[in-house]
Amino acid sequence: MSTQVPQLFAGLVDDAAVFPPGSASLPDAVAAHRRQHRVGWYADLVGPLLVPASEVTAGELDKLIGPADPTDPVDPLVIGLIGDTGTDRLPSALSFLTSLNVRVRQVEVPVARRSEDPQPGLATLLDLVPRLPGGLDVYAEVPLTWGLMEALDTIAEARTAGAPVAAKFRTGGLAAELFPTPAELAAVICACRDRRLPFKLTAGLHHAIRHIDPETGFTHHGFVNVLSATLAASDGAGTAEVAEMLATTDPVRLVERARARRDEPRPLWIGYGSCSVVEPLTDLIRLGLVNGGYEQ
């Protein structure tokens, strides 16, 4: 018999199959999301299918979406729109999507490059938010460089004022400098905690426990490290303890903290996009945090 994914892990992994390093074709990604991930026993683990705005407007998505089918349990397709074409083209992509049998749950947009002040891009995005369709969650991707804390203040103020906006950070990439240190990521997690600001992460979170990629030599954060660190932060831990949770490669302490809270909602951390859903699922099963499809 199937089992429900514990609440702590609900919606943890957005399906980013079309993004590197997986780079699946959009037809393959849509098919796997609808006919495998959304109907599998682990469906509660999986968030929306992430689709770049550039592919929405390229005319391929409309060929893959059929008319509404009330007998189909995974209809309509739920997607998250990634603003790879910039803020100014988001309205046209969203307008196009309204003609399709899809439901857009969230929009995620980078507001600056690493060398740029994030405030102008944030201002543009926040000006746009009231003109977006209702019911969308909006994530402003902020570089982990100078101006970060001021950007978090701006996002938190907008959220307090009623804007459905939260933060997003990059935790990996194709260069070593794109991987924040445990101390840097701990500071960001605690800063979001202090501002009551939810956040998303993206890139580099391929496995549960912190590890070195044998091909690149880059040290990757583990998603269970991040989860345990966020739980610690939500309990009032300081940056040193949070950084310690992020830095450890010993799974025992991490698993114990997560297991103790697995029937509770996940605080602060909305989740992350992964080009593979199977990899994090497999790690959770191996660690005994998800029960592999059988009754718990």
Image (cartoon, helix red, strand yellow):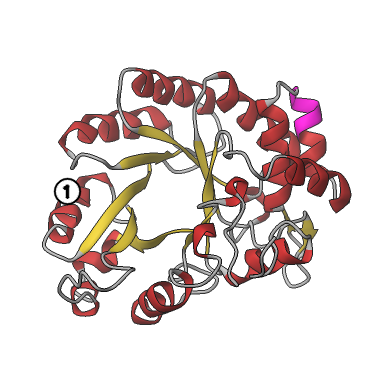
Q: Position of residue 110 (x, y in %)?
A: 39, 45
User: Is residue 221 among the parts visible in the rendering?
Assistant: no
Q: Is residue 156 above or below residue 267?
A: above
Can you say which quadrant of the picture contains the N terminus? bottom right
- Quadrant housing residue 145: top right
Image point (17%, 70%), residue name: 68
- Quadrant housing residue 180: top right
Q: Position of residue 183 (x, y in %)?
A: 74, 34
Q: Residues within 10 Å of mark 1 (few under 14, many from 20)?
A: some
Q: Is residue 40 above or below residue 87?
A: below
Q: Is residue 60 above or below residue 237?
A: below
As shown in the figure, which amino acid type bears the numbered disc 1?
Answer: Pro
Can you say which quadrant of the picture contains the C terminus? bottom right
Mark 1 highlights which residue? Answer: 91
User: Is residue 179 among the parts visible in the rendering?
Assistant: yes
Image point (21%, 69%), residue name: 70
Q: Nearer the viewer, residue 270 or 172?
A: 270
